[in-house]
Image (cartoon, coloured by chain):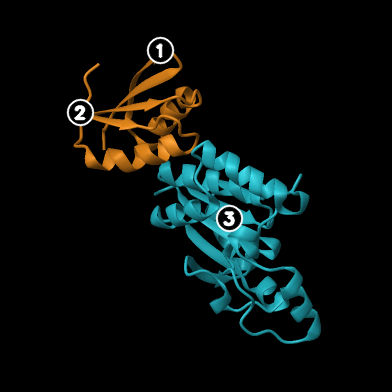
């Protein structure tokens, strides 16, 4: 049976998420079974690039305005400089023939990497299934992660 | 060394050489040899690790002018 790798993506920072996807693609190439669990700020990675479809309460509405989802909005954890740093990093990646995060997400899905979204954060932030990209295969909670973590040889939190 | 197929990963960084190797090796028959060309020094360690993990045979690596030619035999 294939070795299992589970990565919790808690961060919504572009650089950290890139590291997670590098590992995921490498593991998939090593014929390992990879599951990515997206929670908290990490949900921004798998959110569509638009406003949440329906959300209740003023706090959630404010949050959805200041915390817009979508891969192209993810900031760098350092030197973001209001998005300037991110643009420069993207240019450097392009010049170095490093695939963009959008491309990595597509590749990961083709290679059988599974995407799981955390329902607790979704509920708290007012994010519904239709706000998430189609690559997300399952919505689940901590029991699902823990169940799979016990089967996993490699479990990471990013 | 004679290879049955060549995979050009020049200019690509980790993990793309092994990601492309994993895809390309599917086109080969068992016993055939794949040659992977790369500038990435990491491939010296990564390709043996990939072979060990996936059950393929790491044959050899040739170095020259910052270019690496890695030979892998498909075993399964």
x, y (%) of residue A10?
68, 58
Residue B4 is marked as 2
Task: In the picture, one chain is orange; tell me its letter.
Answer: B
Q: Nearer the viewer, mark 3 or mark 1?
A: 1
Real-space CA distance between mark 1 and mark 2, rounded to the nearest whole angstrom: 21 Å
| Residue at 48% over, 26% down | B40
Instruction: Tell me which chain the residue with mark 3 is part of.
Output: A
The answer to the question of whether label 3 and label 2 lie on touching residues, with beta carbons closer than 8 A, is no
Instruction: Tell me which chain the residue with mark 1 is part of.
Output: B
Task: In the picture, one chain is cyan; tell me its letter.
Answer: A
Residue A146 seen by the camera: no
Q: Nearer the viewer, mark 1 or mark 2?
A: 1
Residue closest to the far top: B64
Q: Which residue is mark 1?
A: B64
Q: Secondary structure at mark 1?
A: strand
- Residue A123 vertical position relative to residue B30 in the rendered view, above or below: below
Work out whether mark 1 precedes mark 2 in sequence or the reverse, and give the earlier one.
2
Q: Which residue is mark 3?
A: A149
Q: Nearer the viewer, residue A123 or A53?
A: A53
Q: Quadrant of residue B39?
A: top left
Q: Nearer the viewer, residue B55 or A52?
A: A52
Side (left or right) of A79 relative to B73: right
| Residue at 45% over, 39% down | B16
């Amino acid at each position: 049976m294939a070795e299992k790798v589970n990565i919790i993506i808690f961060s919504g920072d572009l650089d950290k998420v890139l590291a997670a996807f590098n590992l995921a693609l490498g593991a998939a190439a090593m014929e390992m079974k990879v599951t990515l669990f997206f929670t908290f700020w990490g949900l921004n990675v798998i959110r569509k690039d638009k406003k949440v479809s329906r959300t209740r309460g003023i706090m959630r509405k404010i949050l959805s305005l200041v915390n817009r989802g979508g891969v192209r909005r993810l900031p760098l954890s350092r030197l973001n400089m209001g998005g300037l740093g991110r643009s420069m990093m993207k240019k450097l990646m392009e010049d170095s023939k490093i695939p963009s995060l959008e491309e990595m997400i597509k590749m990961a899905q083709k290679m059988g990497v599974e995407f799981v979204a955390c329902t607790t954060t979704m509920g708290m932030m007012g994010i519904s299934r239709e706000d998430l990209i189609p690559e997300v295969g399952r919505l689940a909670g901590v029991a699902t992660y823990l169940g799979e973590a016990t089967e996993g040889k490699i479990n990471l939190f990013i | 060394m004679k290879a049955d197929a060549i995979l050009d990963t020049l200019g690509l960084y980790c993990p793309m050489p092994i990601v492309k190797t994993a895809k390309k090796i599917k086109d080969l028959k068992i016993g055939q040899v794949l040659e992977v060309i790369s500038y990435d020094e990491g491939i010296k360690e990564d390709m043996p690790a990939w072979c060990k993990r996936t059950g393929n045979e790491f044959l050899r690596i040739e170095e020259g002018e910052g270019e690496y030619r890695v030979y892998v035999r498909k075993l399964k």
